[in-house]
Image: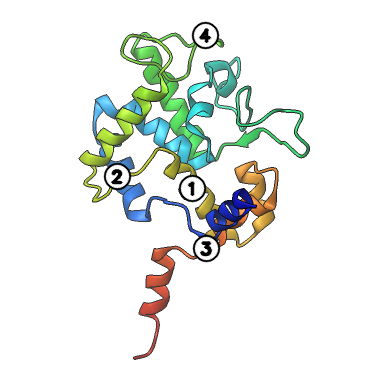
């Protein structure tokens, strides 16, 4: 009973998410710096797909690029939350044209950096050319938040919340958002129906007073 009450309380609260301004600042500061190119792509993928941190870090080059080194339109995840036998689990992700263009440039960048682009090679690697770890990713995200001038500290998972929230805000389609988020239950997706602070401010500005 306590567990159910805790769960119901959690879906009543809006998730901590990046504002539009924070998203723009994060992508701008990582895009401006050569050293931030890998992280720029990581954050772009998180915001463009809603992928979780461990799902992003598990990607190999061959998961994202075909034999001609062209970015795929649809990617079937090999590692994800839950188990493939769960009813209703659809663990494929669609990439936008904008994200595919960034991925094409990232592939060229990896080649220029003498990073392996073999199909089984990690997509994201550390300075030591090893698969990027979750600890390293969290450290990088904290660093870039500071450089982007964030006034608060957010977890990497807030990027997923931003992506899912944006899909719902643009479509107002709960089932579509569920499909994007890859949730087993639409009840879980309902957390994104909470109006954001930005939506509240826009509504208030339109009031006659």
When the figure is inspected, residue 74 is found, relative to residue 68, above or below; the finding is: below
Per the rendering, the mark at residue 161 is: 1
Q: CA distance from mark 3 to mark 1?
A: 12 Å
Q: Earlier in the sequence, mark 2 or mark 4?
A: 4
Per the rendering, the mark at residue 153 is: 2
Q: Earlier in the sequence, mark 4 or mark 1?
A: 4
Q: Residue at x 37, y 54 (%)?
A: 19
Number of callouts: 4
Quadrant of the rendered structure where residue 140 is?
top left
Q: CA distance from mark 3 to mark 4?
A: 43 Å
Q: Position of residue 90 (x, y in %)?
A: 71, 36
Residue at mark 3: 194
Which residue in the rendered view is the most extreme toward the bottom? Answer: 209
Residue at mark 4: 118
Q: Position of residue 103 (x, y in %)?
A: 46, 28
Quadrant of the rendered structure where residue 201 is?
bottom left
- In this rendering, the label closer to the viewer, 3 or 4: 3
Q: CA distance from mark 2 to mark 3?
A: 21 Å
Q: CA distance from mark 2 to mark 1?
A: 15 Å
- In this rendering, the label closer to the viewer, 2 or 4: 2
The residue lying toward the viewer, choosing from 21 and 79, is 79
Q: Earlier in the sequence, mark 2 or mark 3?
A: 2
Q: Earlier in the sequence, mark 3 or mark 4?
A: 4
Which residue in the rendered view is the most extreme toward the front? Answer: 1
Q: Earlier in the sequence, mark 3 or mark 1?
A: 1
Looking at the rendered structure, the secondary structure element under dot 4 is loop
Tags 2 and 4 touching, CB below 8 Å: no
Q: Position of residue 57 (x, y in %)?
A: 48, 23
């Amino acid at each position: 009973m306590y567990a159910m009450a805790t769960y119901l309380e959690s879906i009543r609260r809006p998730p901590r998410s990046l504002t539009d301004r924070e998203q723009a600042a994060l992508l701008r500061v990582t895009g401006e710096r050569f050293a931030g190119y890998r992280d720029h792509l990581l954050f772009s993928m998180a915001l463009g797909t809603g992928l979780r941190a461990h799902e992003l870090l598990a990607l190999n080059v061959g998961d994202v690029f075909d034999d001609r080194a062209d970015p795929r339109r649809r990617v079937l995840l090999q590692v994800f939350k839950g188990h493939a036998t769960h009813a209703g689990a659809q663990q494929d992700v669609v990439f936008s044209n904008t994200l595919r263009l960034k991925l094409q440039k990232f592939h060229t960048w990896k080649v220029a950096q003498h990073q392996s682009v073999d199909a089984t090679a990690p997509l994201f690697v550390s300075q030591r050319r090893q698969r990027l770890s979750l600890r390293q990713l969290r450290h990088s995200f904290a660093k870039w938040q500071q450089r982007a001038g964030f006034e608060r500290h957010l977890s990497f998972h807030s990027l997923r919340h931003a992506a899912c929230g944006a899909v719902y805000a643009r479509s107002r389609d709960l089932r579509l958002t569920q499909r994007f988020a890859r949730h087993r239950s639409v009840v879980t997706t309902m957390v994104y129906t909470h109006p954001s602070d930005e939506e509240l401010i826009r509504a208030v500005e339109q009031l006659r007073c």
